[in-house]
Amino acid sequence: MLTIAVTVGVVTGVILGLLGSGGSILTIPALVYLLKISPKQAIAMSLGIVAISSFISALNHWKRGNVDLKLAAVFGLFSAGGSYLGTRLGVVMPPALQLMLFAAMMYVAAYQMLKPGAAAFKPVGADVVRPESEAVAGGAGLTRRLWHTALVGLSVGALAGAVGVGGGFLIIPALVLLAGTPMKQAIGTTLVIVTFNTLTGFIGYLGRVPIDYPLMAVLTGVIIAGSFVGAMLSHRLSHETLKRSFGVLLVLIASYVVLKSAL
């Protein structure tokens, strides 16, 4: 079992380091189908693992000035609240339904990986030069964006808490499209938000499902180590090819989860 756990951690960590995100979404199917852990226990452990690994990555981005703390606080507050509510629902939700929702999020993540990157994350109206009369309404536009950001944060947090993922693949486009955040800052800020989400979700599961802390510690350590290896390899490989390959892998794993849950 330890050998499988180390292998899973290395693969997940390397993918996380190569792509900057997404690798943690492999943790739950690995825990459930390879390590034979119950879905609810796997979801709780995944939240703890992602919280620690995201926090370490967020610190690195913060040192580089790629974190918007104000935006992270606004989005993170609502998404963390949604995550806690999601865990309350997840505790009583049938495991098969949780896995189906998880598979649906994997399909969404795969779509984000497979579609063209640059155009997909371009803020609406970014190239439009607004007349002075529209600039007066800038305050109202900002208010609308903040409300949209809060609503998306609450929704993403609830999904993340219910199925055990950070939701970074949903948060990044939300920050770029709704808040007009530059991509580098969106990635760093998302890691802070994911830390809030997953830590809150993990706390929500404490005392309600059994958690294998030694196994969780091994996986966390190996994933973090693997992410450094992946980060070094990322300079030698095509990022677009990696994204597309990972997208295909997510489709295959999600389809497997759906088939196993339906049988």
Image: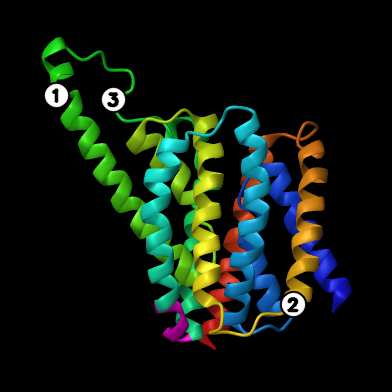
Camera-near label (1 vs 2) is 1
Residue at image point 43% right, 86% down: 92
Residue located at (59% from left, 66% from top): 47
Q: Is residue 121 visible?
A: yes
Q: Position of residue 128 (x, y in %)?
A: 27, 17
Q: CA distance from mark 1 to mark 3?
A: 15 Å
Q: Which residues are magenta?
A: 89-94
Q: Classify 30 as above or below 186.
A: below
Categorize mark 3 by other alpha carbons within 10 Å: few (<14), some (14-19), many (20+). Answer: few
Q: Which residue is mark 1?
A: 137
- Circle 2: residue type: Leu
Q: Earlier in the sequence, mark 2 or mark 3?
A: 2
Specify the quadrant that holds the N terminus.
bottom right
Q: Position of residue 203 (x, y in %)?
A: 53, 70
Amino acid type of the residue that numbered disc 3 sits on in the rendered structure:
Gly
Determine contact: label 1, label 2, CB under 8 Å. no
* Residue 185 point in image, percent of width and height: 51, 31
Note whether residue 20 is visible: no
Q: Secondary structure at mark 2?
A: helix
SS for dot 3:
loop
Q: Nearer the viewer, residue 239 or 153?
A: 153
Q: CA distance from mark 2 to mark 3?
A: 46 Å
* Amino acid at dot 1: Ala
Which residue is label 3 attached to?
125
Element type where label 1 sits in the image: loop
Label 2: which residue?
Answer: 34
Q: What residue appears at the point 49 percent right and 58 percent down from the top-left corner?
A: 197
Characterize the magenta stretch by its predominant secondary structure. Answer: helix
